[in-house]
Image (tube, helix red, strand yellow):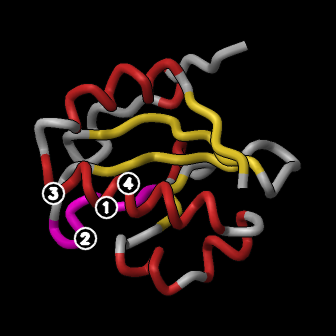
Amino acid sequence: MDIKHTKNFDNTLKKLKSHHKEYNNFLNILDIIEHARDFKVLTNLPQCKMFNFERLKYDKSEYYSFNLSKSRGVIRLIVKPVDDNSVELYLIMISYNHYEDFDPRKVIFYE
């Protein structure tokens, strides 16, 4: 699967390096995403369930998240499949406060 980044993701990744356990889990998740054939396969992988992969609700329903702590953590990787293309995935941002610091209207995509 192809992975694309947003400016928000690049800005929030820097802070993650100081959270060693979550950073290692992030690298594991990236490996899982890269080896998945498409988004539908990704959603059904047992490894994703390990990281509490879930669809967000309400105004954020186009987005999905992985819990980088595996359980009860507040640091999450937020992703979004590229419209009408199940083989590309945007890494939107890393939320450090259980989605409270995530606003879909403020996501900045690279051109």
Side of 30 relative to 5 (left or right): left
Residue at 76% in and 65% down: 38
First of labels 1, 4 by sequence position: 4
Residue 100 at x, y = what percent? Answer: 27, 38
Residue 67, magenta (yes or no): yes
What secondary structure is found at the residue carrying circle 3? helix
Residue 73 at x, y = what percent? Answer: 16, 60
- Measure the C-alpha gap from mark 4 to mark 3: 10 Å
Residue 70, magenta (yes or no): yes
Q: Which residues are magenta?
A: 65-72
First of labels 1, 3 by sequence position: 3
Tell me the tag on residue 21.
Answer: 3
Instruction: From the image, tell me which residue sits under label 4.
Output: 27
What secondary structure is found at the residue carrying circle 1? strand
Label 3 crowd bin: few (<14), some (14–19), many (20+), radius 10 Å: few
- Identity, as a three-letter code, of the amino acid under mark 1: Asn
Say if mark 2 contacts mark 1, CB within 8 Å: yes
- Identity, as a three-letter code, of the amino acid under mark 3: Lys
Instruction: From the image, tell me which residue sits under label 1.
Output: 67
For the C terminus, give its image quadrant. top right
Instruction: From the image, tell me which residue sits under label 2.
Output: 70
